[in-house]
Amino acid sequence: MTLVLPIIVPLCTAVVLLLAPAKPAQQRWIAFTGSFAQLAAALVLFLQVQQQGYVVAQMGDWPAPFGITLVADVFSSMLVVAVGIVGMAACAASFGGVDPRREAYGYHPLLQILFMGVAGAFLTGDLFNLYVFFEIMLMASFVLMALHRTNDQVAAAFNYVTINLLASAVFLTGLGLLYGSAGTLNMADLAAVWPSRHEPGLDLVLAMLFLTAFGIKAALFPFLFWLPASYPLPPAPIGAVFAGLLTKVGIYALIRVFSLLFRDGSPWPLTLLLWMSIATMLLGLIGALSQRDFRRVLAFNLIGHIGYTTIGLSIGTSAAMAGSLLYLAHHILVITTLFFVSGILLQLRRTTDLAALGSLYRDHPWTGVIALIPMFSLAGLPPLSGFIGKLAVLRGTFGAGFYVTGAVVLVVGLLTIVSIARLWDEAFWKPATKPAVAPTPSRPLMVPVVALSLLIVGMTVGAEPLFRMTTRAADQLLAPQDYIRAVLDSGLGRGR
Amino acid sequence: MELVFAIVSGVLYATGLYLMLRRRLAQIIIGLGLLSNGTNILIFAAGGLTRSNPPVIPPGELEPIAPYADPVPQALILTAIVIGFGVLAFTLVLAHRVHQSLGSDDVDDIRSEGSA
């Protein structure tokens, strides 16, 4: 039951939102309540997983390989909690941050459907179901992105839609071939059957298909160019949700599928993934340094730091994986917060072009101080969560003997500091060329930024239990026998 | 029979990808449609092409009659067709919007207008 709630609650909220009168105030409160309920459901699930290790539910009581399975382990329950947190922040920001046109055309229900798709993708135990939740999430994000008349946004939306549909087609191709050979799409069943079959050719083809499909969705090199063209354009709450959640679904799918299906297969796809991660990190940060717009710098930082989260999978030791997962959790919080900060800048100065920004620290010292927390955290300055995440990744890479990768991680960390220092200098420190438009940042945008910044500080304080949790998640991922047993046994036990 | 299906699906993939690399929005959308149909045929063929009974349990029996077709690929394709149809309809509307706001259906014009 607890497994269904994080998926059902946003769906019900969306239905209520569609039925309720289209008054902005009511819609906002319903959406906020719904997101709160989803976060609560996610937390209950999280606590349950902490106690039991795995929570499994068979839909309609069909035994495991035949019906649809929902399953949560530490990794997925952690991400579902992140969905709840980002969702609540976005709904809180929607009290002031969205234009009325968008709100009238179904902004709130679409956002809820997006949360449902993301939570579903994290919780499903069936590969085809994963495809369906991907499509739900993408459809909602397509409309959210296109809900606007400005030329830039419509054009960016078209590029975004095309590249994502291509990724879906590649994913579906992989699914079809996999089913044709293995005869099942239940992930646990596949994990039990597939690695022991000796079809090295097909195994390699499938690994490459999934790597391509999820690589596009996660914006890994060489598939990253769609992201900076589309993410900086929508208003702050949408940008924050996209940046925080959508690429992470690609990473989740990559980690899940590779740790279950291709763990004993050819080592080439994982080596390739390692080089792709390295290229993503370097290219992302070099791109960030070359940009002259606050939100585009953020988008490139987002890409660059995605590399950190895939290193662990390609190295494959418990320490590296745990570091990457910790970094993933930190990254979701920080990048979401920074997109909200960009929304504040947009509100104060009507632009995020770095040349036109400036003297924000003089005009709004508190905003500047609070924005420093996510910025320093992204840059990895001690003692904030970014530093702890990077340290964990570094210990994983050096511990496994991947010195080149570790060196790249360090260089990229340095580049991030440069990029963030430049952002702070240009946006907050240097004297402005243009006068301020709005006198103070509106409270609906400040609330999520403050709350998320406090959470980042909380992550710093609670780093040790968090790292213990991601270590447990990594151990679960690296030893899928327990996952297989948990899913398949529960089906036989209750179904008969 | 498998060979025919393999060739058809390969041709659909090739034409779909070729069209997606073209400059006009309409061609890209047709390419997307062909690509998703190629995928559907691939799933259908990969699921096993057999001349056998429908996977329906006749009245009074407990199992379907012995050589029966696997229903799962067909269910997958059905879902994929529905999703593909919805997505295609949305892309058409979006392309219409792009054409309305830019007055062009050329991808190069989108690039120069956009901030990429």
Image (spheres, grey):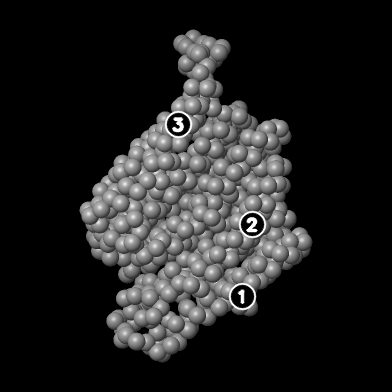
Subunit bearing disc 1: A
Does B1 sit above or below residue A344? Answer: above
Read off the residue under disc 1.
A414
Q: Residue at x 33, y 61 (%)?
A: B112
Percent coordinates x, y for residue B16 in the rendering: 41, 38
Q: Nearer the viewer, residue A266 or A87?
A: A266
Mark nearer the viewer, 1 or 2: 2
Mark nearer the viewer, 3 or 2: 3
Using the rendered image, report if marks 3 and 2 lie on a common chain. Answer: no
Q: Residue furthest top?
A: B60
Instruction: Tell me, yes or no, whether the two marked residues, 3 and 1, touch with CB atoms within 8 Å.
Output: no
Where, by quadrant of the figure, is residue A342 drawn? Answer: bottom left
SS for callout 3: helix
Subunit bearing disc 2: A
Residue A434 in view of the camera: yes
Does A357 sit above or below residue A331? Answer: below
> Would you say B73 lies left or right of A18 here?
right
Read off the residue under disc 3.
B11
Percent coordinates x, y for residue A261 in the rendering: 65, 41
Q: Inspect the image, locate mark 3, and give the three-letter code of the amino acid beneath it.
A: Val
Residue A275, disc: 2
Q: Inspect the image, locate mark 2, and give the three-letter code of the amino acid beneath it.
A: Trp
